[in-house]
Image: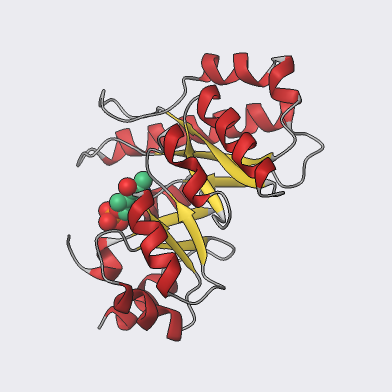
């Protein structure tokens, strides 16, 4: 059943778009089922849950931390996390850098931007990100590598608004790439789109979609 859902979603993906299967709240057995069907990239939003699943599941799974991350929890995922999508403050990025150094790793990160109208969604404003990227302190971080940006659109039926919000994020992506990461080929990811809006996100240039309930069922 969830394997069928996975294949259905995969059929709808634009070529080159990576699927992150968002397995939060779902049992490790579901993840194993999709792993056996070939899926390797999974997304979780809680550190403890991510660590628990990491410990019992195959070690070649690529674990994506997709939700808000508290600085005091970075240390638990630093040894193995594949990509941190929700970097929403300079303080957090510095903490990731510090813990990555202890593990002798360079951790791939995405900068999360606030693009939705809702107040509750985390993320940088464009100005805040610029300020960070232009600081000397940022340039000195040797153990993080910024692979791109991430954002969540408003939870709404208004598809025009969703289009506009994803366009805004795409625009930020291009501006930041041309100003700060022109010579970093790793800066190429635009993580946008969830079950309800990933088709729109792909129309707006998404390279990575984070799909949970359409694959695993409602939570
Ligand atoms: C839960 C979650 C998703 C997946 O949401 P679905 O609507 O179940 O596809 C994607 N991104 C983030 C940041 C999430 O927290």
Q: Position of residue 113 (x, y in %)?
A: 46, 30
Please give the count of numbered marks on the rendered protein. Answer: 0
- Which residue is the extreme one toward the right? 183
Q: Quadrant of the C terminus?
A: bottom left
Residue 197 shows up from this direction: no
Q: Is residue 209 left or right of residue 107?
A: left
Please provide percent x and percent y for residue 144: 67, 39
Question: Where does the image place residue 150, in percent across and percent down from the top left?
Answer: 48, 40
Q: Is residue 61 left or right of residue 162?
A: right
Quadrant into which the N terminus falls: bottom left
Whether residue 97 is visible to the viewer of this picture, yes or no, is yes
Write down the quadrant of residue 153 in the picture: top left
Residue at 35 percent across and 53 percent down: it is 48
Examine the rendered structure and indicate whether residue 187 appears above or below residue 125: below
Q: Residue furthest front?
A: 102
Q: Quadrant of residue 110?
A: top right
Q: Residue at coordinates 50% horizontally, 51% vertically from top-left?
A: 77
């Amino acid at each position: 059943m969830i394997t069928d859902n996975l294949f259905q979603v995969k059929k709808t993906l634009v070529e080159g778009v990576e699927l992150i299967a968002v397995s939060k709240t779902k049992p490790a057995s579901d993840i194993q089922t999709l792993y056996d069907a070939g899926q390797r990239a999974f997304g979780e939003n809680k550190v403890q849950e991510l660590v628990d699943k990491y410990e019992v599941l195959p070690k070649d799974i690529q674990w994506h931390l997709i939700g808000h991350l508290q600085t005091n929890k970075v240390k638990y995922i630093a040894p193995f996390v594949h990509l941190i999508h929700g970097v929403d403050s300079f303080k957090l990025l510095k903490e990731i850098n510090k813990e990555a150094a202890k593990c002798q790793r360079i951790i791939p990160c995405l900068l999360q931007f606030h693009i939705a109208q809702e107040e509750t969604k985390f993320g940088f404003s464009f100005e805040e990100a610029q300020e960070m990227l232009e600081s000397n302190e940022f340039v000195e971080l040797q153990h993080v590598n910024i692979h791109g940006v991430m954002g969540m659109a408003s939870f709404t039926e208004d598809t025009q608004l969703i289009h506009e919000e994803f366009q805004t994020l795409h625009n930020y992506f291009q501006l930041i790439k041309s100003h700060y990461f022109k010579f970093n080929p790793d800066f190429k990811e635009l993580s946008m789109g969830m079950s309800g809006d990933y088709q729109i996100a792909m129309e707006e240039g998404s390279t990575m979609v984070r799909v949970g309930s359409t694959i695993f069922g409602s939570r």
